[in-house]
Amino acid sequence: MGKINVSLPEDVLQELDKAARASRATRSAFLAQAVKHYLEEREEQEQLERRREAAASIDRFRKKHGGWDATAEVLKWRDRH
């Protein structure tokens, strides 16, 4: 397990300690869980943004090339292979 030193404003530290006590966790355990939660949320947001970009790309393709039925194209490909 790694260790870090973190400097926090006193008011933030007090809120942290209050939240850790309410969760019945140590300060370190509470911070570790908070960081893990933040990183998971960030990854979810990045995935959502990638999906939005992909959908926008598909929409641009449709507008440029007219109507296109992706399901029909996949079925045609599957039937040929």
Image (cartoon, rainbow, N blue to C red):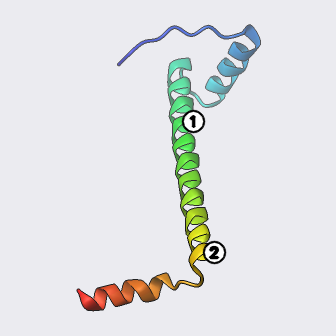
Label total for image: 2
Residue 62 placed where, x, y %? 58, 76
Q: Residue at x 55, y 46 (%)?
A: 46
Local crowd size for mark 2, using a 10 Å CA cut-off: few (<14), some (14–19), many (≥20): few
Q: Quadrant of the C terminus?
A: bottom left
Say which amino acid is labelled 2: Lys
Report if the CB atoms under discs 2 and 1 are less than 8 Å apart. Answer: no
Tell me the element at label 1.
helix
Q: Residue furthest front?
A: 64
Q: Residue at x 61, y 68 (%)?
A: 60
Q: Is residue 3 above or below residue 45?
A: above
The numbered disc on residue 5 is: none
Q: Residue at x 55, y 38 (%)?
A: 37
Q: Residue at x 52, y 51 (%)?
A: 47
Relative to 9, 37 lies left or right: left
Say which amino acid is labelled 1: Tyr
Q: Residue furthest left?
A: 81
Q: Quadrant of the N terminus?
A: top left
Q: Is residue 26 above or below residue 33?
A: above
Residue 41 placed where, x, y %? 57, 43
Tell me the element at label 2.
helix
Task: State the residue in front, 64 or 22.
Answer: 64
| Residue that numbered label 1 is attached to | 38
The quarter of the picture where residue 67 lies is bottom right
Local crowd size for mark 1, using a 10 Å CA cut-off: few (<14), some (14–19), many (≥20): few
Residue 2 placed where, x, y %? 38, 16
| Residue that numbered label 2 is attached to | 63
Residue 25 placed where, x, y %? 55, 26
Q: Is residue 80 above or below residue 65?
A: below
